Image: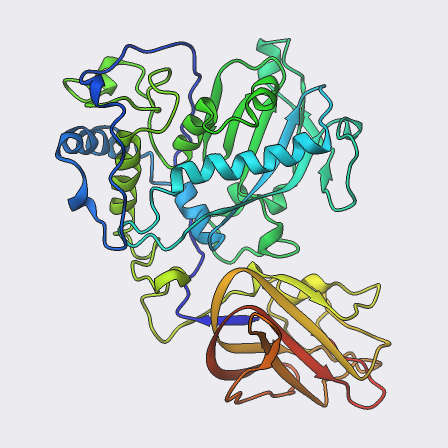
Amino acid sequence: MINKKGMMRASLSVAIASSLLTGNAAMMSAASLENERAVVATCDSTLADMPAYLKSSVEWVWKNRILTEGSTNRKNLIFDQIFAGKGTLNYVIRWQSSKPVTLQQRQDIARMLGLQMNHWTEHLQGYDGWPYKDIKVNVVGWAVADPSLLLDKQPDEVVYTDTITDVLASEQPEIPAALPVAPNGISRFEHFSDPDYSYPGGLDKRFDMYLWATENFGGGAGGDWGQRMSDEYVLSTVNTDEIEITEHEIGHGFGLNDFYEEHERPPGGFPTNTIMWAGNSDHITDWDIWMLRYTWSQLKQDTSRFPSTTNGDEGPIDTSPDENVNIAPAAKVSTSYTSPWENVSALNDGFDPTSSNDRSHAVYGNWPETGTQWVQYDFDQEQTISQTDVYWFKDGSGIDVPKSYKIKYWNGQGWSNVKQAKGLGTAVDQYNTTTLTPVKTTKLKIEMVSRGSASTGI
C-alpha cells in the first residue's frame, strides 16, 4: 500500500440520461452568437467569469431541469469517474456487430475516445478548482460475441466473449440478439456505491463505461454507463475531430440534459446553439461549455463527494490534512520475479490481510529467488508520496520477511533513495509504516534483500 499525503478518497459515484438523435431541431434565437469562442479558463476562473448573455439560460436549466430531474444525484457521473480514477477513464468496447475490426481501427477507436472526452474536459482545466489536465482514456478490453472479428489480435488485448440477450432485438429484429458483456466484477457502474469495493487486479483493471456499437442501431444513447450508437457510425467517424453523436452522448454522462420539447428549454430559447439539443450543433459550443462548468461549480460544493481543495498540478487533496490515502491501486505494478502460482496484482489490490500467511486473496512471492529482488509502482501522472505501508508475506516455509529493504523513487533519469526514511520495519502480521521526505515522482520501487536462503513476498 502506498500513501499520498492528503489525496482525496475515491468513494465517489447519476441518473442515466439517454437520448435518440432523430433529426434536426429548430435553430435557437440569437444564433449569430453561435461561433463566439468560449472564455478561456485560467487557474482562478470561476462562475463570475461566465458571459452575461449565457447566465440566465444556464441557471434556468440547472434549476428547472438538472435539479428537478435529479440528473446529477447518482455519484457515478463522469466527474465522479475521473476523480475515482485519479484523472483516468477506462472503457470496454462492446462490439454488438458482425463487422470485423482491424488492429488499426481498434487503435483509432481508443484514440478517438480520448479526443472526444477531452473536447469536454479541456474546458474544465484551470476552472474553479478542477484539478486535472488532460484525461487519460484507456480501452481495457473488448466484449465481442465472436472473437475472430478482432483481426490481428495482440497478446496484450483483453477480450470478453460472454453474452446476454438484448431485449431491444425482440422489438427490432435487425439488431443482433447476442449482447456481449464484460464481467460485472470489474464494472464501476455496478460497484460505485460501495466505497470499500476492491476491483480484481486493482483499480487500473476496472472499466468505467462501455462504448457500445450496435449493428443497425439508429441514433445514439448515453449515460453514466457509456455511449451507444451504430457500429457503422463508430467506424465512419473514428478519425473525425469532433463527432456529434459521440460528444452529445458523453454530455449525458456529465449529467447534461436533452431538449426535445419546448417546455424543456429556457423561456425565450437559448442565446446560442448547443450540442445537447439534438441536431442543433455538430460541436460543443460556448453554452455547452458553461453549462458543464456551472454543473461542476455546483457539484464541487459537496466536499464529501469532491474535496474542494487542490494542490497545484498534483490533483485533488483531502480537506483533512492528517489523513493519508492509498494510491497504490492507481499504479501499474511490476517486479523482478513472481512465482508462477503467485500474483503480482496482490501488490495493489487494496486487500487488507488478517495475517502474514493470509491466502484468502492473492499474494505476491518470488520463491525460489533470493538476494535482492524488487517491486515497482508506475503512475500515469506525477504523485507526491510521503509514506509507504508494507504487509510482508511469510508462509513458514520458503518465504520470509526480508533482511532489509530500500525505498527508491525515479528522479527522471535514474533511481534515487528516498530521504529520511523512518520505519523500514519487517514485523509480521501488520503493516510496516515508513515515513519519508515527500517526493514527487511517477515511479516508486522497493528493493528487498532476502534473509538467508528464504525468498521474499508481500
Picture coordinates of residue 377, whole percent (x, y): 62, 67
User: Which residue is found at the position 42% from the left and 35% from the top?
Assistant: 253
Q: In this view, does 404 lie above or below 296?
A: below
Q: Quadrant of the N terminus?
A: bottom right
- For the rendered model, the colour scheme is rainbow
Residue at horizontal 60 percent and vertical 32 percent from the top: 109
The answer, for residue 148, to whether it is visible in the render is yes
Residue 431 in view: no
Q: Quadrant of residue 357?
A: bottom right
The residue sitting at the front extreme is: 413
Residue 183's quadrant in the figure?
A: top right
Looking at the image, which residue is at 72% across and 64% down?
Answer: 344
Q: Judge by depth and name the residue closer to the eye, 269 or 363.
A: 269
Give above or below for 329 relative to 230.
below
Give the total number of marks visible in the rendering.
Answer: 0
Q: Residue at x 74, y 33 (%)?
A: 161
Residue 365, position as x, y percentages in the image: 77, 72
**What is the x, y in percent for residue 320?**
33, 70
Q: Is residue 105 left or right of residue 234?
A: right
Q: In which quarter of the image is the C terminus?
A: bottom right
- On the image, the x and y values in percent for residue 26 come to 28, 10
